[in-house]
Image (cartoon, rainbow, N blue to C red):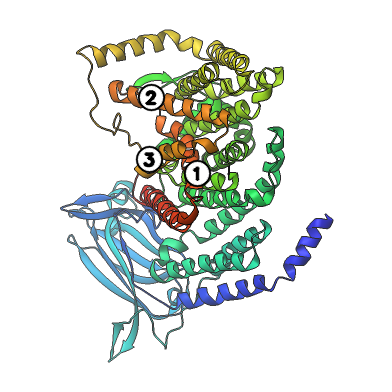
Amino acid sequence: MIKFFAWLTTLLRDRNLYLLGLGSLAVLTLAYQVVLPIQIQVGGALDRPYAVNFQAPQKDDGTLFRLTRTNSMIVLPGIGGGFARRLTITMRRANSQRATRVTVTAQGQPLDDRALAAAWQTDAYIVSDGAAFDAVNWVIHFFARPADPHKVNKPKAIQESRAAVREILIEPVAWQNGQWETTGPLALNRIVRPGPAQLAALTLAVLTVYLLLTNLGVTRRWSALAAVALLGAFAALLMFWRIYLTIFSPTLALIFAASALLAVASAYLTPRLYRLGGLTVTRAELTPTLLVFFIALALKLGGTFYPQFISSDLLYQMHRWERILQGDLYFLTSSPEFGNLDIPFAPGYYVFLAPVGVAFQNLYLILKIAAALFDTTTVFFLAFFAFKFTARANFVAWIAALVYQFTPIPFLMLSAGNLPNIYSQWLLLALIAVVLGGYPKLRDRRVWLGIVFLFFSAGVSHIGNLIVMTAFLAAFALALWLWAPDAAARQNARALALAIVAGIALSFALYYVDFTGLLWNEFVGLLQKKFGGGLRVAGTLAFAKVPVAISAAVIVGGLAGTAVGWKQIAPLLQRALLAWFLSAALFVAIAQFAGIYVRYNVYALPALALGVGIGCAWLTTRGKWTYAAYAALVFYLAYVIWVGLSFWFTRVMYVYH
């Protein structure tokens, strides 16, 4: 408590905090003074957050549009108020044979009430006073009904009376030369009233970044510069892509605050957890990894909660969780990983989350948050491996974390809603951390039972993970046996092999035994189908029509980095990485020849990310070439980040999985 009050006192004396707060309000208010036309293609790719209670997009002769229901709205929060605008709407009646009347209002202010034409018609309305003029948030309301007064109360006539809306355009105007004329983005005689909620939310996000960085030990100057950079990004978005930011600002501020709190909690907990594995790491050494965690968590929560984002598999997972909560643990699902065979839908992930689901009820919300948390906290396992087994560990840790989080495949898993894969990957890394961190005590009963428990937990969370996990641990045990790093290696290999057998036996005894016959028959049938006409190669690196989703830069960087930095790796991690790459290569080959790919791309990524970090650490110690090496590193990481962010942007904004 004393430390908290000391921190609070220091905080209240920090003038940067006040300067950033006031500066944010001023800069954002100035950004609001730039007014560009707002155009929404109703029925287009980006209208989902704004079109409320419309029917699904339709296309007719190349024209995109949506049909209204009886009451439909275009919602535009935070666009600014207090200046004249022209609202242009292109619409027609849905059925050329059905006479339809529509009332159009903006913020409750009547703009039009007329019978719709059968053909597309564009109408413009000037808003120069009234409630819509003053409002910083706009709701354009459409009330469609039968034009015939004798049919206004007939349900069928009401249901068939719809307006087809094609385009919404809002432009700033001014009275000039006896008429309303469109004005430019800036006008000296125009003052735009900003949205108070928008200013508060975005200022909170800026201050959150500053507070987080200073709390993690970053100097105030660099913390302030980072906050100013974020403020500049927000200002640019307000000026040029306003509605894409304002539709989401309050949620974004909440995500920033929650992510920052979790980063601070991780800074406290992670070093303490590392001590269980015999590793001492200071918070200062962990800070770069914590910053990667914060950025990745904010990005992934932001993407999954952005109103444009839709994942059909996320709903699929929610419905499966509902079945599991009702006690139905044994059912099948069709999986493209296994040639669209019916395989068991392993319930481990949802059993683990069951107490949270019972307590909070909102399963959809829990799934989104849990998926992002399991995905992003993998960085702490990578940091553990780096600090425990590599030279220049701090450097390796944050680069491995960055590469892992910004490679497309984790974004794809979130977008596609492959939540059990994300969870089982997390368990796999936890299992590897226990095996490597507890290696000296691998034959100790508690460590051995911990390995069996984690193996079982991961095995009943996803059948694909059970397969790749078994392959990796078997390869690692074999590497310890054939290429012993110490005198106890063979005994430890034997203990690990027994743990694998126990984990498999437990998984089958408690879950998969009911599906053994089905799995055997289906896999035999699949192999007969694949190889009945002779061995055929898939012929493409798309692997069973699923993208690799690991950029070539990461694959090459991971393999090459491991090779050149091999001598900087502790012997135990050398064996683990060798087993990791060889077992992953096995599944690449299986995917090519049999089309069974078991998401080897997700499974191989941690080893590749560590390899990139190891290679970058080696590269930047090349004597007189150090500056050139750092320049190459900057360009390499910039490319990796660009590939990942562009992939995530596309998945969030344009792809319905």
Return the residue nearer the eye: 274 or 417. 274
- The number of callouts visible is 3
Residue 333: quarter of image: top left
Circle 3 residues within 10 Å: few <14, some 14–19, many ≥20: some
Establish if 3 lies above or below 297.
below
Q: Residue at horizontal 39%, vertical 66%?
A: 241
Measure how far apart labels 2 and 1 are at the Cα level: 24 Å
Disc 3: which residue: 556
- Residue at the extreme left of the image, as rendered: 61
Instruction: Give the mark toward the camera: 2 or 1.
Output: 1
- Residue at the extreme right of the image, as rendered: 2
The x, y position of residue 478, in whole percent, is 51, 17
- Residue at the extreme bottom of the image, as rendered: 177
Mark 1–mark 3 CB contact (< 8 Å): no
Disc 1: which residue: 613
Return the residue nearer the eye: 517 or 450. 450
Q: In the figure, is residue 362 to the left or right of 183? A: right
Circle 1 residues within 10 Å: few <14, some 14–19, many ≥20: many
Measure how far apart labels 1 and 3 are at the Cα level: 12 Å
Return the residue nearer the eye: 392 or 259. 392
Q: Amino acid at mark 1?
A: Gly
Q: Amino acid at mark 2?
A: Phe
Disc 2: which residue: 587
Q: Residue at horizontal 60%, vertical 19%?
A: 489
The x, y position of residue 511, in whole percent, is 53, 15
Measure how far apart labels 3 and 2 are at the Cα level: 18 Å
Q: Which is nearer the N-term, disc 1 or disc 3? A: 3
The x, y position of residue 120, in whole percent, is 19, 62
Q: Amino acid at mark 3?
A: Val
Return the residue nearer the eye: 3 or 118. 3
Establish if 571 lies above or below 18.
above
Give SS at disc 3: helix
